[in-house]
Amino acid sequence: MSIGITLPAGDEVTTAANAVDRMVDDARQAAAAGLDEIWFSQRLDHDAIAVAGIVGREVPGIRVGTAVVPIYPRHPIVLAGQAQTAQAATGGRFTLGLGLSAPQRVANVFGVPYDRPIRHLRDHLTALRSLFAEGTADVAGPTLTARTGEGRPARVPGAEPPVPVVVAAMGSQALRATGELADGALPYLAGPKTIAGHIVPTITEAAEAAGRPAPRVIAAFPGVVTADPATTRAAAERSLAFYGTIPSYRTVLDREGVDHPVELAAIGDEDTLAGHVAAYFAAGATDVLITNTGLGTPEDRLRTWELLGRLTRERR
C-alpha cells in the first residue's frame, strides 16, 4: 500500500524560470518529507513521461508515474518507446498511467475522432502489453495498427522489469478491459463507496477471469492540510468544477451521491486528510494518490506532504 502525490501541485510551474527544474526541486522536497511515490500529470505544456524519467533519475529511490497520459494522440509503439526510456532512466521505478481523456478534449484539442473508445483502449493495451513483454507488436485492430515487423524489436535495453500499466478507468467496460489487459486502475474523484462497490469488484473479477494478477486500485483525490480551509475549499471548488460537466466523472459523482467534485476533497487539518486516506484503504484501494496539494499556501503544501510522509512511514 503506497501513498503518493501528483505534480505539478498547482500552477507553480507556469511562473517558474524552468518548469522541469521546479518539478525536480519539488520532488526532492516531497522525498525529504517522507514520500516515496510521485506521479506527474500530463498537460499541454510539459511531457509527463519525460519529466517522470528525469525526476526518477535525479531523486534516488523515488517511484514515479504518469497520471495520466491520454492515448488518442499517441501511437502505442511511440508510447512504448517513451515509457521504456523512462523505465531505463529510473532503474525500474516507472509506472505508465493512461487514460481515454474526455471526448470534447480529444476532438477539440487533438483533432482526433473519439471513435469506439473501449475498443481503442483494448487495441492500445494489447499492443503495449506485447511491446513491453516481447519488444514486438502485431496488432491490426479495428481502431489502430501496430506492427513492428520481424527483426526490428522495439525494446529499450535496461527497461526492466516490463513497464507496469494502469488506466484511469471508472466505467464498467473500461474497468473490464483494464482488468484483462493492464495492471490496475487509477480512478480520479471516485469516492470510497464507488471504490468498494463498483471499481474494486469490477476490475478484480475481470482480472481473475483473464488469469491476471490482482490489480492495483489507485484512488486519487484532492487533499490539502491547511489552517484556512474555507479559502482553500473555495479555490478547490473553482478548480474542480469542470469535472462535474464531464459525463464519465458525472457518473461516478452520482454513484457516490455527491453533487460537486469538491465534496470529495479532503481539506482541513491533519486528521481530516488522514481520515480520508484511511477510508479509501478501507474501501479496498491498494494505493492512494493525493492531488491538488498546491491549492493553498506553500506552507500548506509542505504541511500536507509532511503528513503524507508520516503516513507512508507508518505503513512500511
Image (cartoon, rainbow, N blue to C red):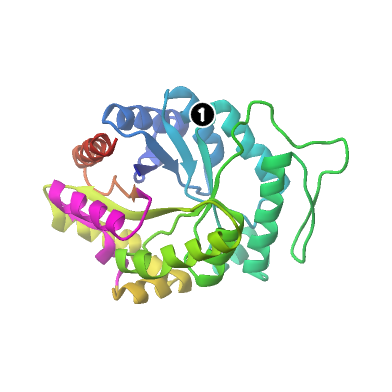
**Residue 2 drawn above or below residue 91:** below
Please name the residue shown 67% across and 70% down the image.
Answer: 115
- Residue 63 position within the rendered picture, expressed as x and y whole percent measured from the top left: 44, 34
**Residue 202 drawn above or below residue 1:** below
- Residue 230 position within the rendered picture, expressed as x and y whole percent measured from the top left: 14, 58
- Residue 130 position within the rendered picture, expressed as x and y whole percent measured from the top left: 71, 47
Q: Is residue 258 left or right of residue 249?
A: left
In this rendered view, identify the residue nearer to me: 185 or 253.
Answer: 185
Where on the picture, by quarter, is residue 87?
Answer: top right
In the image, residue 287 lies in the stretch drawn in magenta:
yes
Q: Is residue 54 left or right of residue 17?
A: right
Please name the residue shown 67% across and 67% down the image.
Answer: 119
- Residue 159 position within the rendered picture, expressed as x and y whole percent measured from the top left: 62, 31
Where on the picture, by quarter, is residue 198?
Answer: bottom left
Q: Which residues are magenta?
A: 260-288
Residue type, numbered disc 1? Ile
Q: Is residue 197 visible?
A: yes
